[in-house]
Amino acid sequence: MSADLNAPAHPTDAPETPNRTSVPTPREPDSPAALAAPAAVAHASDRGARIAAVAIALAWHVAIALPAVLSARAEFAAPTVVLGAWILVAVTGAVAGVRLLRGSPLPPWPLAGLLLVVDAAVFAAAGERQLFTAANWVWGTLGWFFVLAVWGRRVVGLIALLSTHALIALVAVLGHGPDPADVARYVMYVYGTFSLPVAVFVGSTVIVGLARERAAVSAAGHAIAAERDAAERGLRERRDRLALVSSAAGRVLGDLAAGQADPDDPEVQRLCMLAAARLRRLIAESDDVPDPLLHELRAAADVAERNGLPIDLVTIGTPPPLPVEVRRRLADPLTSTLADARGWARLTVVSGPDEVVVSLVTPDREGPESTGPPPGEHDDGPVQYLYERDGNIRWAQTRWRR
Amino acid sequence: MGADPVAAVTGDRPVGVAIVDDHPVVVEGVRAWLATEPRLTVLATGDDPDAVLRAAPGADVILLDLRLHGRMALDKLAELSAAGRRVVVYSEHTDPQTMLAALDAGAVAFLAKHEGREHCVETVLAAASDRPFVPPALAGAMVGDPRPDRPMLSDKEREALLLWFQSMSKASVARRMQISEHTVKQYVDRARIKYTRAGRPAATKAALLARAIEDGLVRPEEIGIYRSQATHDRPTP
């Protein structure tokens, strides 16, 4: 595979491209993911309210209504009807509660109709003497089962059910002869059966709404914070790169502008070439390409080739994703050596999932050492650097191991 | 290894080479390269492997361009190798997969067309005596072999292949690894011999292996499953 130096995208065509690879994309505030979090919070909050409502209804039905019904069963006009209705509501209520907790409630209106039929039957079967006692259990219990039946719907439905319940009770009260004391008691009872279920129903709806809203606000806050972090990181990286560029080219350009450096001096030419190679590599670094390391090495090789150096770039395997710092440590020492190269150069990259080895071989010649680290072995974090000259070749190698 | 290993295979006559390539200019170029080596003689050339072999049935080594008339001749390579023909593949297609596929099909060696005269002569001479020669490009393909069933190479063998691929100078590799050049060559060749286990069996692979055992490059027990085959297919000196 000989060097195909002109084929890759020319990074100079797109200068000042922000580093798209390392800056995390800010979260869209109305993306499905951002909406899911508040919904989950609301769901958790709603579940707590459901458990409370089911527990209140069943506990009231069993702990308060049942003992009263049993102790007064001889005094009902039709004891079997009252007791049978109690059992029917207990079973239906338990099923409705379980279904509600599992998120698949029973159909509300058939259930409500059944409860109203039971309501009327119990009022008829209780008899005048038990009309306002605890043994007439529909007063206290049924409102809570209405709550279970229409859970999650608008409060108007619940009020309609409770009003029907009040109407049935009024018919029963008036049916036994209009007594002003009974009417007063009736009003009190109706108030009692309305207030608590409606309060719980409305309260839970409000709490769920508030939880959803707070979670949405907090998610939006997180998204803004992430966006700000990303922007700050992008800015920091751009500043870092600018500092690197300045150190790469600033001095030699300054010297040339001030007339202190002679463009005919081979050393100045060498420094210019080194600066050009570094600039080219830094520009390549911010390109969004599948193989950033190879792209950056190609950029450096490209500069050398334009300066008339035949260079062979051979790559084996695909490098794993590497942080920009590791890529710099792999490529930079070789860029320095490449700027010194005369005659020819062979640049090779061998990559595996856990190892990347980059090597540059050029003919050895008299002259100063390259501007890279001194000969020998150096460990720079996870990257090992090796440079030697044996009179025959100059050999620079960087090696990253996971 | 004897003083002149090639003479041990062919007697005193030079090694007969057949060149199969569909570009006449390449044929002429390779013929000119080989002509500088008195131990080699080109017996026939052409663009059809069967026709060339009919013209020179006694060719010791076939130099085969892997891409003939627009298609990869891997099947033909496998057929020739199975029949015991020593085929040196040379190609401008030097992607690692192609090189490893050629080794799997039974090629004795793989030469990149840009690797030049010296490597070409050296490779053909080594092939004639069933000895491995690993040019740098092939060393790179072997060291970067990503296949899960690739041969297990030792650390030294891997390092020798890698440095040979990078530097193209065995003297430099020897200095870097602080061993002799001869040992570098041994590590590289041992790695190549391990590749005779990859892909389908071929008479040429068995011959390479048998010669490696004879030269003391590998011990039979290091190779395992190929041992019996090697004893059957040992070429007659």
Image: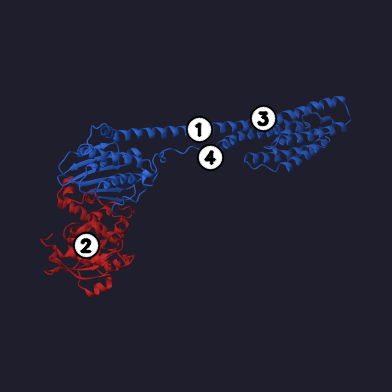
Chain colours: A blue, B red
Q: Where is residue A103 in the image (x, y as percent from the top left)?
A: 63, 41
Quarter of the rendering containing residue A375: top left
Q: Distance between the residues labelled 4 and 3?
A: 28 Å
Q: In this view, does A316 lie to the left or right of B18?
A: right
Question: Which residue is more in the foreground, B153 or A142?
Answer: B153
Mark 3 lies on residue: A203
Mark 1 lies on residue: A224
Looking at the rendered structure, the secondary structure element under dot 1 is helix
* Amino acid type at mark 2: Leu
Asked if the residues shown at circle 3 and circle 2 are in contact, with their CB atoms under 8 angstroms apart, the answer is no
**Which mark identifies residue B208?**
2
Q: Is residue A356 left or right of residue A166?
A: left
Looking at the rendered structure, the secondary structure element under dot 4 is helix
* Amino acid type at mark 3: Gly
* Amino acid type at mark 4: Ala
Looking at the rendered structure, the secondary structure element under dot 3 is helix
Q: Position of residue B20 (x, y in %)?
A: 25, 68
Mark 4 lies on residue: A33
